[in-house]
Image (cartoon, rainbow, N blue to C red):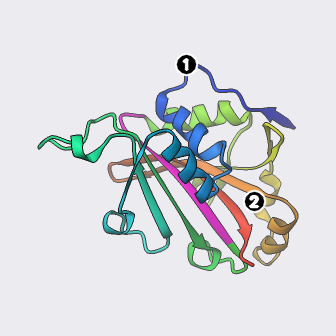
Amino acid sequence: MVFTVSASDAVAEPFDQFVDFCVSTNAEREVVAGAVKGAGWFSLPAEEILDDDDLLDPALYISEDPASFTDKGPPADMGMVMTGWGAGEDIFDIPGVKMDACVVVVSNENADGLRQRLRDFLGFDSTDMDGEELWIFSRQGDGFRSEYEDADVDDALVPDLVRRKKLYVAGVVVEDDFVGLIMAALRPSE
């Protein structure tokens, strides 16, 4: 089953940012960087801010000029996008693959509401992977195809699988006060 990309005016701005910066770029870090910078966003020194050892070559972008922050800090509605990559053996114990990630940080949003927006946007239901609600898909032109059947493939077969077709994973990340929409591209490591 194939679904087409269409963003609705009723979709919240952070979700539009997710579509523009993560989905439209296929989560390719260099392409994400070009899209974010082209939209006038600002780069911050990610290594000094992020403490995730699994995320290599991290990049952090914000929608507001840091020079404009007051003593109260950044505006509450400031957009934030993070990118990076990780080796499969470090992230999900599968050697031979790597994962490029694009995350849009969302504030004042309900995680269940974001999951519903992601479900509506992609056009199919998620799958449960180790207690996480995730969407596994491939691109079909401007549309998406559910690849949920690949969720249970033997780990040893994953490197060959991602050589044959481009697979993406999307979901909602919730950690402490952090809510984000993530899209990851699975790629062969060589």
Asked whether the beta carbons under mark 1 and mark 2 sit within 8 Å of each other, the answer is: no
Amino acid type for the residue under numbered disc 2: Ala
In the shown orientation, is residue 4 left or right of residue 173? Answer: right
Q: Main secondary structure of the magenta part?
A: strand
Instruction: Name the one closer to the observer, 80 or 130.
Output: 80
Instruction: Name the one closer to the observer, 186 or 84.
Output: 84
Residue 13 painted magenta? no
Separation of marks 1 and 2 at Cα, in angstroms = 31 Å
Label 2 Cα crowd, 10 Å radius (few <14 / some 14-19 / many 20+):
some
The percent position of residue 185, horizontal first and vertical second, equals 68, 58
Amino acid type for the residue under numbered disc 1: Ala
User: Residue shown at 85%/73% (left/top)?
Assistant: 160
Q: Is residue 13 above or below residue 24?
A: above
User: Residue shown at 66%/42% (left/top)?
Assistant: 24
Residue 10 is tagged as 1
Q: Which region of the structure is painted magenta?
A: 98-109
Q: Quadrant of the N terminus?
A: top right
* Residue 140 figure quarter: top right
Residue 105 is tagged as none
The percent position of residue 86, horizontal first and vertical second, equals 57, 71
Instruction: Name the one closer to the observer, 62 or 150.
Output: 62
* Residue 158 figure quarter: bottom right
Assign a secondary structure to mark 2.
Answer: helix
Q: Is residue 3 above or below residue 98?
A: above
Q: Quadrant of the C terminus?
A: bottom right
| Residue at image mark 2 | 151
Instruction: Name the one closer to the observer, 94 or 184.
Output: 184
